[in-house]
Amino acid sequence: MKTKSFALVLTLASVALCSSVTAADTKPAADPGHTHEKRTAGPNRGRVITGITPRAEFFVTPDRKVQITFLGKDDAVIAPAAQVVTVTAGDRSAPTKLTFARQGDVLLSTTALPAGNDFPVVVEITSSPGSPNAVEKFYFDSSQCGECKNAEYACICAH
């Protein structure tokens, strides 16, 4: 008798679980009252940092230096003003700190990113003395996304 009761409880639990999964699968993709910002790539197909005005593009050059490009209206490149940028990357126990120098209309790191392809990156941008820092944290992965063809660190897909 106990076996039949246990089997009945197990069957009911399975039905309930399947029903909840099916209900979750049929929910609308997005809550109409909540909007998500669409990610876009910068003019160099880099990661756009949106928590600062003007927005900035984080782009890794072929020699693994970081290029920061500030973006105005319609993603037009604007020259850096008084912004100060610091990037901390690599192994958390021994991170590499990158500093930047102006090169034309962009800021270019004076050294390259550390070796490797899967490590945390923290970008800090101060617009002017006394203003709060914009901080962007993500994992660096330079492999190419199969969908949008950007580097994974700058992927604009929904995955």
Image (cartoon, rainbow, N blue to C red):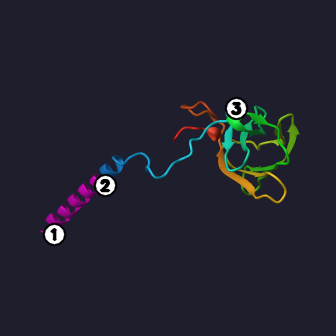
Residue found at x 72% / y 40%? 57
Q: Which residue is drawn at 35% across and 47% down?
A: 25
Q: Disc 2 designates what residue?
A: 20
Instruction: For mark 3, give the secondary structure.
Output: loop
Q: Distance between the residues labelled 3 and 2?
A: 44 Å
> Residue at the spot x=67%, y=46% of the render?
50
- x%, y% of residue 42? 68, 35
Secondary element type, mark 2: helix
- Left or right placement of residue 104 versus residue 134 in this view: right
Question: What amino acid is labelled 3 in the image?
Answer: Pro
Closer-to-camera residue (32/136): 32
The residue indicated by pointer 1 is 2
Residue 58 screen position, x and y as percent: 72, 41
Q: How crowded is mark 3: few (under 14 residues within 10 Å), some or many (20 or more)?
A: some
Residue pointed to by mark 3:
43
Magenta stretch in the rendered image: 1-20
